[in-house]
Amino acid sequence: MRRARKTYRALHERYPYAHCELDFTTPLELLVATILSAQTTDVGVNKVTPLLFARYPTASDYAGADRTELETMIQPTGFYRAKSDALIKLGAALVERFDGEVPGRLADLVTLPGVGRKTANVVLGNAFGVPGITVDTHFGRLVRRFGWTTEEDPVKVEHEVGSMFPRSDWTMLSHVLVFHGRRTCHAKRPACGACPVTQWCPSYGVGETDPDKAAKLLKYELAPR
Ligand code: SF4
């Protein structure tokens, strides 16, 4: 437990600016962006959302969207047919059941088409300020490498890791782990030699340990301090 807290503190120091990397200004925008982010990068989603959000500002705009036009707008994010379908159904469900507003409760969010627990937690944590742990591929990989859990099931991971930290840390914990996974502790070639948590990580050595070679593996948009 102390090891986990120290790891979190060190990662928070390394990525004090960690945040949700999807651009949005309203819960609806974040919900749509999160659905679009499946199987693609946040950077790719941020390229299509300015035009999309301007064209479809409300849930009822998605409900009544012209499918072909919507598909064309989101095509660069991949799986655009399934995603268009999800957005149209999402818009309709929001209008029918929630007066066109995105609900701020997990139990309601997960009843929406295309919205699983991961998406719901992203929206709760970032658009509603409700503490939430978002177990995406980076989060799951890292907490297993850290030895915080051996679970593979995202819901079990969420509960096990959640019990190790105060609720107030949950959203930032999710952000710093995702940042660490994207920038340093990659799935294929983790940069162990340039990692700030080596002393608490039982997986040190699964990646490059030479400091110079490891530094070249870092994927930073900002240099580490
Ligand atoms: S020491 Fe290696 S495996 Fe452990 S967190 Fe750092 S980069 Fe990942």
Image: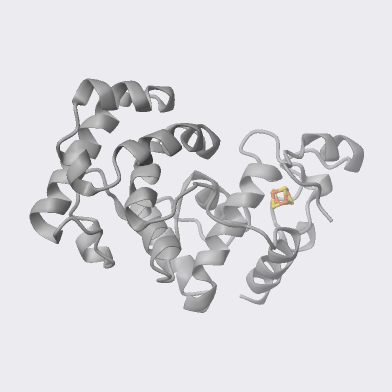
Q: Is residue 45 above or below residue 17?
A: above
Report which quarter residue 124 is drawn in.
Answer: bottom left
In this view, the residue in front, 221 or 188, is: 221
Position in image of residue 86 (x %, y %): 23, 37
135 relative position to 155: left or right: right
Position in image of residue 221 (x %, y %): 72, 42
Q: How is the image coloured?
A: one colour
- Residue lying furthest right in this view? 212
Q: Is residue 28 above or below residue 69?
A: below
84 relative position to 36: left or right: left
Quarter holding the C terminus is bottom right
Q: Is residue 20 above or below residue 80?
A: below
- Residue lying furthest front in this view? 54
Instruction: Inspect this view and state whether residue 117 appears.
Output: yes
Position in image of residue 123 (x %, y %): 38, 58
Query: Residue placed at 70% from the left, 63% from the top?
Result: 16
Position in image of residue 132 (x %, y %): 42, 66
Instruction: Inspect this view and state whether residue 165 appears.
Output: no
- Residue lying furthest left in this view? 96
In this view, the residue in front, 209 or 114, is: 114
In this view, the residue in front, 117 or 41, is: 41
Report which quarter residue 39 is drawn in.
Answer: top left
In this view, the residue in front, 29 or 218, is: 29
Quarter holding the N terminus is bottom right
Query: Residue placed at 13% from the left, 45% from the top?
Result: 92
Query: Residue placed at 41% from the left, 62% from the top?
Result: 127
Q: How many marks?
A: 0
Report which quarter residue 43 is drawn in.
Answer: top right
